[in-house]
Image (cartoon, coloured by chain):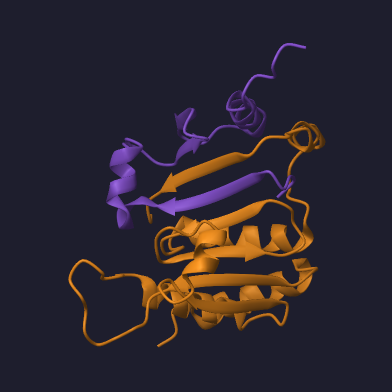
Chain colours: A purple, B orange
């Protein structure tokens, strides 16, 4: 909600078993960011942000 | 019979009156409800999700519900990235997009209520540091949180 680039989804996996399989959801909550970064369990806010920022593509060298 | 108890509705009425600022529209995608079910196309929770959203949005004048058909409103579904149903999109003061796939039951009901408040205010309850870090993001980020109804 802070940034127009960010889309946040809440997905109820028991209704969408295909997604549970595709993302190998074995525990909840499981978070997947840009299909690059994933973790299971709730994280404190600063750690969560760290993970979110990890999903960003590195900036090209200038 | 309503899904929300009288106590729940009263509690939400107080919360919404205190917390909601700008209007929030929920765009909900479902399929036509029919007495016949077509194998492979059942949407087990579409009806319950619609009823739940109707009950929640009826509590405050600042909350609006738009019900769309996943098949006949395909273009809008595509624009909002709705690829399966039941699903809905929250739109209000906030930037970014918040979507729910599946019925928001159990803990996810509280998530929905908190998100309605945050989208209405446009400022989520995050620390200054977090907000500063997120404001610098200049690439698209797609965060998916998988849950189960507990």
Residue A51 at x, y = what percent?
Answer: 58, 27
Please identify the residue farthest to the top as the structure is shown.
A61
Q: Which residue is at a point 40% across and 65% down the rendered structure image? A: B85
Query: Which quadrant of the view contains residue A50?
Result: top right
**Relative horizontal placement of residue A11, taking residue B20 as reference (left or right):** left
Q: Which residue is at a point 47% across and 69% down the rendered structure image? A: B74
Residue B127 at x, y = what percent?
Answer: 77, 38
| Up-down relation of residue B150 to residue A62 (above or below) | below
Q: Which residue is at a point 60% across and 55% down the rendered structure image? A: B98
| Up-down relation of residue A16 to residue A38 (above or below) | below
Residue B9 at x, y = what percent?
Answer: 58, 79
Q: Which residue is at a point 49% across and 52% down the rendered structure image? A: A10
**Relative horizontal placement of residue B12, taking residue A32 as reference (left or right):** right
**Relative horizontal placement of residue A21, taking residue A33 as reference (left or right):** left
Residue nearer the viewer, B53 or B143: B143
Residue nearer the viewer, B48 or B12: B48
Query: Which quadrant of the view contains residue B14?
Result: bottom right
| Up-down relation of residue A12 to residue A20 (above or below) | below
**In which quadrant is the C terminus of chain A drawn?**
top right
Query: Which quadrant of the view contains residue B20?
Result: bottom right
Q: How many marks?
A: 0
């Amino acid at each position: 909600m802070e940034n127009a680039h960010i889309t946040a989804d809440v997905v109820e996996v028991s209704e969408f078993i295909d997604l549970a399989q595709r993302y190998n959801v074995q525990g909840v909550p499981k978070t997947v960011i840009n299909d690059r970064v994933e973790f299971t369990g709730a994280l404190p806010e600063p750690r969560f942000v760290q993970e979110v920022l990890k999903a960003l593509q590195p900036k090209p060298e200038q | 019979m309503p899904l929300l108890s009288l106590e729940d509705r009263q509690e939400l009425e107080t919360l919404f009156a205190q917390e909601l600022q700008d209007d929030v529209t929920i765009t909900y995608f479902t399929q036509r409800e029919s007495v016949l079910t077509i194998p492979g196309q059942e949407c087990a929770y579409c009806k319950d999700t619609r009823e739940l959203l109707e009950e929640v949005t009826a509590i405050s004048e600042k909350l609006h519900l738009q019900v769309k058909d996943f098949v006949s409103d395909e273009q809008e579904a595509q624009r909002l990235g709705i690829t399966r149903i039941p699903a809905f999109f929250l739109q209000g003061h906030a930037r970014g997009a918040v979507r729910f796939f599946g019925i928001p039951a159990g803990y996810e009901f509280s998530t929905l209520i908190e998100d309605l408040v945050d989208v209405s205010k446009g400022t989520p309850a995050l620390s200054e540091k977090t907000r500063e870090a997120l404001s610098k993001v200049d690439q698209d980020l797609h965060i998916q949180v998988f849950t189960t109804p507990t």
